[in-house]
Image (spheres, rainbow, N blue to C red):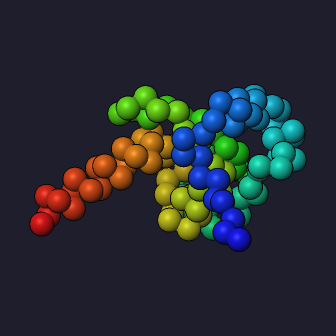
């Protein structure tokens, strides 16, 4: 049986409410929440900041700048972006998956 991957795309209202609720918890409560992903600080050495580095990642709700769709930037995706793709720690999700796909498809069509 294929396991359904929870990507945060097109979340139902219950998932949005839960993600919002977790963002309002105290840090000590967030750290122990089941959806929290611990950060590996050794993989964040590419970040040059005066601020502190995260101890963990939590699901974050955002609204797409282009279409207004609500999505969840999952903790696992943040972990990958910051630690494996070496993204900057101040970067956040601003476009939904559909708008990013549309932009990349448009870019490929222009190259052809």
> Can the viewer see residue 73 in this picture?
no
Measured from the top left, where is residue 80 in percent x and y?
Answer: 58, 62
Extreme residue toward the front, this view: 1
Quadrant assignment, res 5: bottom right
Q: Where is residue 73 shown, x and y percent of the image?
A: 58, 45
92 sits to left or right of 102: right
Q: Which residue ends up furthest to the bottom in the rendered image?
A: 1
Report the side of 30 relative to 73 (left or right): right
Residue at image position (55%, 50%) is 89
Question: Tag count in the figure?
Answer: 0
Question: Which x, y percent locates residue 62?
Answer: 54, 34
Q: Residue at x 69, y 65 (%)?
A: 3
Q: Quadrant of residue 72?
A: top right
When the figure is inspected, residue 37 is found, relative to residue 13, above or below; the finding is below
In the displayed structure, does residue 95 sit left or right of residue 36? left
Image quadrant where one finds the C terminus? bottom left
User: Residue 16 versus residue 31: which sits nearer the camera?
Assistant: 16
For the N terminus, the quadrant is: bottom right
Q: Residue at x 63, y 49 (%)?
A: 74
Image location (x, y in percent) of residue 35: 77, 49
Tell me, yes or no, if residue 29 can be seen here. yes
User: Which image quadrant for residue 68?
Assistant: top left
Q: Residue at x 14, y 64 (%)?
A: 111
Relative to the observer, which residue lies in front, 93 or 28?
A: 93
Q: In this rendering, is residue 77 above or below 93?
A: below
- Depth check: give the residue in front, 26 or 94: 94
């Amino acid at each position: 049986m294929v396991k359904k991957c929870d990507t945060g795309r097109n979340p139902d209202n219950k998932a949005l409410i839960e993600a919002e609720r977790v963002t309002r918890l105290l840090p000590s409560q967030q750290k122990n929440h089941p959806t929290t992903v611990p950060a590996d600080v050794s993989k964040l050495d590419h970040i040059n900041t005066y601020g502190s580095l995260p101890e963990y990642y939590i699901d974050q709700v955002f609204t797409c700048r282009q279409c207004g769709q609500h999505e969840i930037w999952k903790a696992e995706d943040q972990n990958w972006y910051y630690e494996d793709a070496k993204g900057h720690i101040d970067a956040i999700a601003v476009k939904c998956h559909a708008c990013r796909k549309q932009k990349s498809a448009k870019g490929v069509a222009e190259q052809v």
